[in-house]
Image (spheres, rainbow, N blue to C red):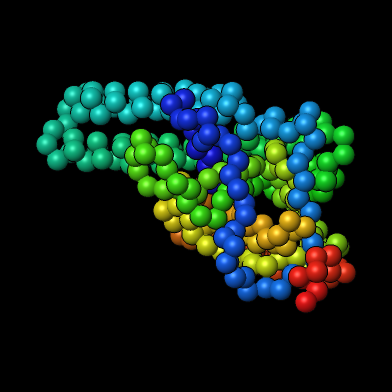
């Protein structure tokens, strides 16, 4: 998983979290018997990680890392055939090999750097919070990105296809003792009992590619159903080219969520009790 680089020409609205409320007529396969708790992170600590400045700095750092690679590729393609007295098909084969090798290195650096940087910043920020729901040094957790489950409408002046929207980034912990999905994110906190789930499945959304596998989560809250997607981070960038690796990671998260104990609560909303 990679986080999109900061676009200095995007409208300010592009950096605002979107709605996680599903359509009013949406039907879900599961019946909720508990309530999920979603709350805003306290004001002094909210939105301190995925800021415009941090997004710009991460994007700038990745550009600076890539410049030497691009320069090396250019000089090898431009001058190596002359130094090695190559011509014709030999020169073309060398050029293709150089481009292939550096493309792989380019993508691996991209996968390694961005998620690692975001995770380090997120864990440092969580450790500064007075009462986080996840203590990164005590409990096993993983860095994830939260996205919308449907493409967002694009402005008339924007080109390309509609993409899903990044809602938040944070740490995910699956608590098998309490049967809860716990998310400590940059903007919000989520405590989602297994019994509050309305849906949990692996889907493909248009985000970085048209086939980005994510775990769709829909849960019952005091204000109605809430729906979003969990995108796992690329913790092992050397395997990003292994077939079905991204989908396998999403399937592993979904399977572990289903393995959580289902502990129902007393129904809170009247319509849930019917």
- For this rendering, which residue is in front, 88 or 128? 128
Residue visible at 84% across and 65% down in the picture: 268
Residue 122 lies, in percent from the top left, at 70, 36
Q: From what the image shows, is residue 23 above or below residue 66?
A: below
Q: From what the image shows, is residue 77 above or below residue 179?
A: above
Residue visible at 55% across and 55% down in the picture: 149
- For this rendering, which residue is in front, 105 or 24? 24
Q: Quadrant of residue 104?
A: top left
Say whether residue 236 is left or right of residue 271.
left
Q: Quadrant of residue 95?
A: top left
Q: From what the image shows, is residue 83 above or below residue 207?
A: above
Q: Residue furthest bottom?
A: 274
Residue 258 lies, in percent from the top left, at 70, 69
Q: Can the viewer see residue 70?
A: yes
Quarter placement of the C terminus: bottom right
Residue 73 lies, in percent from the top left, at 32, 29
Residue visible at 62% across and 51% down in the picture: 20
Count of numbered labels shown in the rendering: 0
Q: Residue furthest front?
A: 270
Residue visible at 88% across and 69% down in the picture: 266
- For this rendering, which residue is in front, 196 or 101? 196
Q: From what the image shows, is residue 4 above or below residue 228?
A: above
Residue 120 lies, in percent from the top left, at 68, 34
Q: Can the viewer see residue 259?
A: no
């Amino acid at each position: 998983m990679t986080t999109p680089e900061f676009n200095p020409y995007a409208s300010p609205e592009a950096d605002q979290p979107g709605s996680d409320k599903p359509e009013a007529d949406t039907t879900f396969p599961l019946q909720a018997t508990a309530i999920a708790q979603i709350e805003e992170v306290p004001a002094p600590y909210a939105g301190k990680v995925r800021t415009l400045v941090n997004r710009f700095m991460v994007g700038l750092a990745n550009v600076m890392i890539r410049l030497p690679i691009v320069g090396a590729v250019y000089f090898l393609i431009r001058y190596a055939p002359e130094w090695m007295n190559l011509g014709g098909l030999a020169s073309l084969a060398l050029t293709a090999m150089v481009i292939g090798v550096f493309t792989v290195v380019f993508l691996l650096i991209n996968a390694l750097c961005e998620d690692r940087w975001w995770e380090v910043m997120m864990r440092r920020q969580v450790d500064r919070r007075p009462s986080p729901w996840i203590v990164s040094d005590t409990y096993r957790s993983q860095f994830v990105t939260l996205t919308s489950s449907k493409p967002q409408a694009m402005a008339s002046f924007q080109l390309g296809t509609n993409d899903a929207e990044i809602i938040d980034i944070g740490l995910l912990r699956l608590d098998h003792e309490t049967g809860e999905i716990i998310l400590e994110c940059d903007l919000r906190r989520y405590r989602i009992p297994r019994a509050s789930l309305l849906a949990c499945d692996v889907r493909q959304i248009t985000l970085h590619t048209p086939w980005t596998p994510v775990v769709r989560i829909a849960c019952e809250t005091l204000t109605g159903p809430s729906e979003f997607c969990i995108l796992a981070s690329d913790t092992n960038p050397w395997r990003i080219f292994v077939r079905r690796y991204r989908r396998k990671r999403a399937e592993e998260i979904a399977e572990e969520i289903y393995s959580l104990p289902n502990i129902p609560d007393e129904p809170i909303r009247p319509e849930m009790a019917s």
